[in-house]
Image (cartoon, helix red, strand yellow):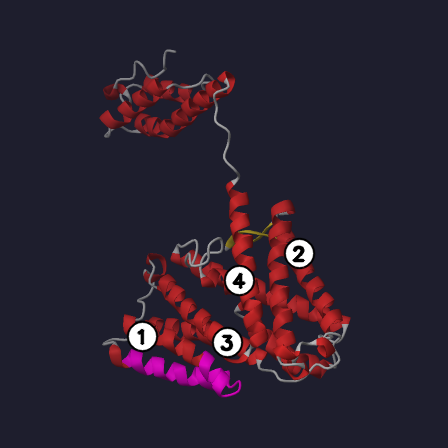
Amino acid sequence: MTSTLSHCSPGLVVAHSEQVIAFRRVFKRRTPFSEVDVLRVKSCCRTAPQLGVGCRLAQRLVPIVKCSAKRAQVEAALSSGDAPQPPASPSFKGLAKRALFGALLGVLGGCILVAGGVPFTCLISLVAYQCTQEYFGFITSKGIAKGMQPPPPPVTATISLAAVGISIGTLLTRGRTGTCLAVAAFLVVALQLLSTRKPKFAQLSSSIFGLFYCGYLPACWIKLRMLSVPLAGSTIAPHWPVMLGGLSHFTLGLVATFVAVVSIIAADVGAYMVGKAWGRTQLIAISPKKTVEGAIGGMACCILATTALSQLLHWPSSAASAVLLGFMIFVCGLFGDLMESVIKRDAGMKDSGNLIPGHGGILDRFDSYMFTGALVYFCARYVLPFLGL
């Protein structure tokens, strides 16, 4: 096959308009390209770096020629029957890995949730510590660091420890999470002002937000779990095993935390499955993969989960309160997810880490949980009793 570029002289690419026309004709050619065409086009680009329009057309032509040559090789292999079998779908492998590690996390987390107290606080403390590490990984990335100066390393280390301290302090003070946050914030600000010669407001704001986002919000789950109001009206309460504490340990904190966690999981699974199957309309620009159809599916699954659990556990006590709670849990989970998407987009990073196979980092897995613990506590403690639901 004679290539249209066989007569292309680098010195004539711009000097003669006929060569430009020849390049444009090659774009419209229907016959497959060969590897010789690839070499000829590369030669024109390499030997004429100072050329204008013709050279730019040649540079645009290189990937097209490569693609056409590769397609011709594949078609020839298929026609001869020597083509290798395609590998297993990577999306299926990724989904299987995600489901496996998600199930393991669910079993482990469920056992710790039932135990409550110190084991649950230790789990939340580990989550808070790792969240701060990943958060400051975002802050120190090239994308965000261009517009601000990250806090010095001693301050970031102190914030990680302070986030753990908020969780432990919540347990020791019987739920005074706000007081623990105020003390931790004072210590962080004092250290930053003393350790930095010319402290920036951007440094202080990123530090305080990191303490709130990665320390205070996770600790609200401890505060929720500590609600000690017994739920004797549940159908499960009389059969609660003595080895798990008996009826006295079947409390509002245990049930509300369990309902919130299961509802978030249902929303995530529903949004993923519906979005994959029928998702067409983009939900929001900051997270291109999220669709309106997926969001509707996630909301429906979340409300169904809270409604079903309310019938089983007798909390929330009515269908209306279950629907309201399910809707609020979904909204909180969605905006928690979008919040991390904004941070990742500014940082220019796809995932916060790779600690959990198939899920990414801790922030990737628990972003939907960040605001939900505080909201469910507020609803269980104040909103639902006030509304008589």
Instruction: Determine whether the residue tagged by mark 2 lies in a helix, strand or loop.
Output: helix
Going by the numbered disc 4, the residue's amino acid type is Leu
- What whole-number distance in Å separates the C-alpha atoms at marks 4 and 2? 26 Å
- What whole-number distance in Å separates the C-alpha atoms at marks 1 and 4? 31 Å
- What whole-number distance in Å separates the C-alpha atoms at marks 2 and 1? 42 Å
Location of the N terminus (image quadrant): top left
Q: Position of residue 212 (x, y in %)?
A: 45, 75
Q: Which residues are magenta?
A: 167-193
Q: Position of residue 95 (x, y in %)?
A: 54, 49
Going by the numbered disc 3, the residue's amino acid type is Pro
Instruction: Determine whether the residue tagged by mark 4 lies in a helix, strand or loop.
Output: helix
The disc label shown at residue 296, or none: 2
Question: Which circle's residue, 1 or 4, is located before the other in the chain?
Answer: 4
Going by the numbered disc 1, the residue's amino acid type is Val
Q: Describe residue 181's horizontal placement relative to residue 6 as left or right.
A: right
The disc label shown at residue 119, or none: 3
Q: Which residue is mark 4?
A: 105
Of discs 4 and 2, which sits in the foreground?
4
Question: Which circle's residue, 4 or 3, is located before the other in the chain?
Answer: 4
Question: Which circle's residue, 4 or 2, is located before the other in the chain?
Answer: 4
Question: Which circle's residue, 2 or 3, is located before the other in the chain?
Answer: 3
- The outermost residue toward the top is 2
Q: For the stretch drawn in magenta, what is the main secondary structure?
A: helix
Q: How many marks?
A: 4
Going by the numbered disc 2, the residue's amino acid type is Ile
The disc label shown at residue 155, or none: 1
- What whole-number distance in Å separates the C-alpha atoms at marks 2 and 3? 35 Å
Q: Describe residue 321's horizontal placement relative to residue 69 as left or right.
A: right
The residue at 39%/78% (across/down) is: 162
